[in-house]
Amino acid sequence: MNTRFLRYFVACVEHRTMLAAAEAVHISQPALSKAITTLEQELGVTLLDRHPRGVVPTPFGKTLFRYAKMIDSEMRRAVAEIDAQRGMTRGTIVIGVIPTMTEMMGEVAQTTMRLHPGLRLKLRVAFSSELGRALLDGELDFAVLLLPAEQRSPGLSFAPLLRTGPVVVVREDHPLTDQARSSLKDLARFQWLIPDFPASHRAIVNAAFLDAGLPPPTAVIDVSTIVFFDSLIRRSDLVTVAPATLLSARTGSALVALTTDFVFPLEEVGLAFREHSTLLPGARAVMDLVRVQCATMPGAVATPAL
């Protein structure tokens, strides 16, 4: 089976139209259509359903897509490893990162461009659960994510970078910043913006208010994560719960953490990668830079090189 045709097929599924896929792999649309037809004839099944608005993989196509992604990933790794044996560090490294660590990864990307100009980085921002699945499917070389507190995904290896926890956050000139400690009654006077993820943070806040005989705060705004909405906090008296890494990463963010009675558990942010999979030299180089960058952040955990 022609691996180039498999790459074309993957592009069709990912871009959802033959035209966009052809542009992505730098061939003409007729040549792409011919390649897909050749694959279908070779396998004896229909891989793509053609519609006026694009293409959708059939059940057979979904199966091939899953394996084709793995094959493409392993071929890319083979080329990169051969390059490393020739003393070259180049190729594409695909990295997953949770939203609260994007600023850190931006610093790492800048350093990578300076030290390893032959490397190209592809960054995928998502929540930890999605990144874990992408690692297992071979879509990522490694990820920086929130490590599971208890049962860890089989097939993945983890290395902690930071041990930190959520904090209650307000803007730097908020009325509550004049107090050494903010009580629940103080916090109840203000409106809240409460992220949906992780749900445990909202549960801890609600439980603390109920235990004190106070109604839990009602979120005037619900967001999936505070990372992309911290400007709302900076421009209002809203109160929110945010990872401490968000504050430590953003110098001059105009956000401060309050001292409160909430008991939030510590959480670990770390590196994750597939077990029994040879890490590309380029991936190792970037992971080392991630460790160096995280070592300067509060809650840093000393980790040996992998």
Image (tube, grey):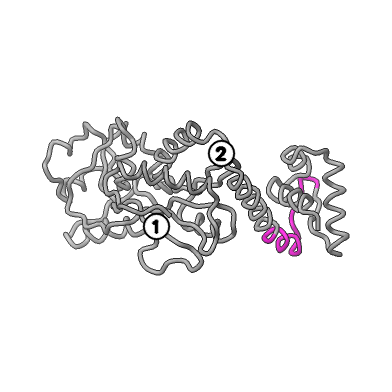
Q: Quadrant of residue 170?
A: top left
Q: Which of the two residues, 38 or 185, is positioned nearer the viewer here?
A: 38
Q: Which of the two residues, 16 or 134, is positioned nearer the viewer here?
A: 134
Identify which amino acid the numbered label 1 is placed on: Ala
Question: Percent from the top left, x then y, of residue 280?
Answer: 55, 51
Q: Quadrant of residue 277?
A: bottom right
- Say above or below: 106 vs 152: above
Q: Residue at the spot x=36%, y=34% of the render?
A: 231
> Which residue is denoted by mark 1 in the rendering?
159
Q: Which residues are magenta?
A: 52-67
Identify which amino acid the numbered label 2 is placed on: Leu
Q: Secondary structure at mark 2?
A: strand
**Between marks 2 and 1, how big is the CA–CA gap?**
23 Å
If the image is split into quadrants, where does the N terminus sit? Answer: bottom right
Instruction: Indicate which disc residue 130 carries.
Output: none
Q: Is residue 91 shown left or right of residue 148?
A: right
Residue 8 sits inside the magenta stretch: no
Residue 61 sits inside the magenta stretch: yes
Q: Secondary structure at mark 1?
A: strand
Instruction: Indicate which disc residue 119 carries.
Output: 2
Question: Percent from the top left, x then y, of residue 56?
Answer: 74, 54
Q: Is residue 225 shown left or right of residue 74?
A: left
Q: Is residue 288 shown left or right of residue 267?
A: right
Question: Percent from the top left, x then y, of residue 257?
Answer: 23, 42
Question: Percent from the top left, x then y, of residue 41?
Answer: 88, 60
